[in-house]
Amino acid sequence: MKKILESSDKNEIDCGSCVSKGCTSCSTSNSNSENHDPTLFTRRNFGHTVLAASAGLFLAGCGRSKTTPVIGTEGKVDSVAAAAVSPIVTLPKGPILTVLSEFYKMGPGPSSSHTMGPMRITYDFYQRLTKLPADQLTRATALKVHLFGSLSATGKGHGTDRASLAGLLGKSPAECPPQFLDDLATNPDKSYPLTIGPKTLNLTLKDIIFDETKGNFHHPNTMTCELLAGTEKIYELEYYSVGGGFIEWKGYTIPEKGQPKYPYEHANELKKYLIDDKIPLGKLLLENELAISGKSEKEVREFLDQVAEVMIRGVDTGLKVESVLPGPIKLQSKAAEMFRNLKNTNKGAAGKAITQVASYGFAMGEENARGHIIVTAPTAGSAGIIPAVLKSLRDLNISREKIHEGFLAAAAIGYLCKHNATLSGAEGGCQAEVGVGSSMGAAMIAQALGEGPKVVSNAAESALEHHLGMTCDPVAGYVQVPCIERCAYGAVKAWTAYCIASEENPEERRVDLDTTISAMALTAKEMNSKYKETSEGGLAVSVVLC
Ligand code: SF4
């Protein structure tokens, strides 16, 4: 594996310091969060950053790029631009240290860096304000947020302003109701009261200011949050939405992590512990999570309950709402109608089951497109798959503990793919997003239904294998076509993979998970950059929008 990665595209890129964390819109978890370096930034942000070229190039240390990114087309995934930087640049540097809270991130879609990150930032600022002394708060007259660089250039189309205002108003990214975000979008002049301690301020979208797009910013996605008394800044903090929903701020230091009880980089190492130590997979993954995160088992389980709740809420909302999705495609939602028609279907058991799972995938994919709250699993663009799998497991009355085990197994697959290949459409095409999501889903089903580790691993392998080579070519740069339907397919294929893996003799499967992850990395490396979330190839140039 390392060999493949290390040989990666010397012709295309001169440096290894860019860490691509994937789509800003559909994207991804930080592809290197355990080695999170504030001086690294995303490939797609690199595209944006040509606006802030000097700063961006300095930060990335990149020698050159292959294309000249095109920036600032409002509402686009950011896309058009970023074919430039490297394919796979993240080299494994030791055991996997990713934890659940880094992987399953909650916040508004459709962009992890332009909506999820900003909302997490302003919510963080809101929480800091609640801890200020009363005398400072009493003097306050206004709250302002300034968006810089790419956030300013493309933020309007992404809904950065409403996401930022929602967080500033104390709406938690995990719990903000979709109606509230819709209300912000449809009533741009409405004033919302915010009470902090002794002070009440009235905030509007105008308090989120689209500021300079070019400048010597510390990061391409820079924001400042200010509490003002007249023109005096009582309290301010500069923040960075660094990709994948991750946030940092001036003076940020990387949180310390513990060491895993069972260190592993590859699936085969994981398997060895299961055999040698005779420990169940769910227990091993939980013990690693506790050791690395330092959290208690209760905290971890509560977090997983919250993830499940957000996912189920998203699916249930998506199954009820019918609307034309935002953006130029004018895509009509399908989930609600598919689900409604299930009652009178004559498709037989197979047709009914497939339609049901697909409608769940559509529901959450459409919620992402609406800018409502989603969970990255592994990315925003692929965020419909695991909720669809979860909902279908809930239909089977699977216990809370088994669902938790399923989430842990799914995360382990995501970690392996992240560590040894990529989770980013901008690096590896859609195989890295929907392919990994489907693979995670297959593992989740197998684990939650009580299969042994071999079946879990085989199911994950099978789902990933049958997404190899899948390109990323979102039409008009929006995370809608093909992304939403792919979530439906990803969920159905997760079930297919599980059904195959649970019926075959597990010892007779000829391809193992590590091999397929390695194949994905190789395919990603060799994939033409047109098919890596640039909207320069495939469907994106074939579909004509009227
Ligand atoms: S095509 Fe796949 S990888 Fe590309 S934006 Fe859509 S979901 Fe993400």
Image (cartoon, rainbow, N blue to C red):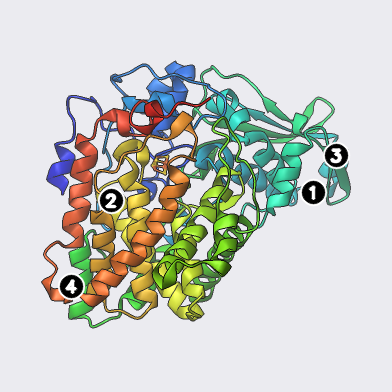
- Residue lying at 46% horizontally and 63% vertically, measured from the top left: 357
User: How many angstroms separate mark 3 from mark 1 (CA)?
Assistant: 20 Å
Drawn side of residue 279 relative to residue 237, left or right = left
Which tag is nearer the camera, tag 3 or tag 1? 3
Give the amino acid type for the residue marked by disc 4 in the picture: Lys
Q: Amino acid at mark 3?
A: Asn
- Along the polypeptide, which appears first: circle 3 or circle 1? 1
What amino acid type is highlighted by mark number 1?
A: Pro
Sequence-wise, the earlier of marks 4 and 3 is 3
Viewer-nearest of discs 2 and 1: 2
Determine the residue positioned at 28% across, 42% down: 90
Look at the numbered disc 2 and give the secondary structure of its residue. Answer: loop
| Coordinates of residue 149 in the picture (x, y in percent) | 54, 24
Q: Give residue 202's mark.
A: 3
Closest to the observer, 53 or 370: 370
The three-letter code of the residue at mark 2 reads His
Q: Earlier in the sequence, mark 2 or mark 4?
A: 4
Is there CB contact under 8 Å for labels 1 and 4? Answer: no
Q: Which residue is mark 1?
A: 133
**Residue 517 in view:** yes
Q: Nearer the viewer, mark 1 or mark 4?
A: 4
Image coordinates of residue 303 in percent, x first then y, are 54, 66
Q: Nearer the viewer, mark 2 or mark 4?
A: 2
Look at the numbered disc 4 and give the secondary structure of its residue. Answer: helix
Residue that carries the numbered disc 2 in the rendered image: 467
The kind of secondary structure element at disc 1 is: loop
Direction from residue 414 to residue 305 in the image, left or right: right
Residue at 49% from the left image edge and 61% from the top image edge: 387
State which image quarter holds ligand 1.
top left
Report whether 269 appears left or right of 150.
left
Q: Which mark is residue 272?
A: 4
Q: Is residue 371 left or right of residue 40?
A: right
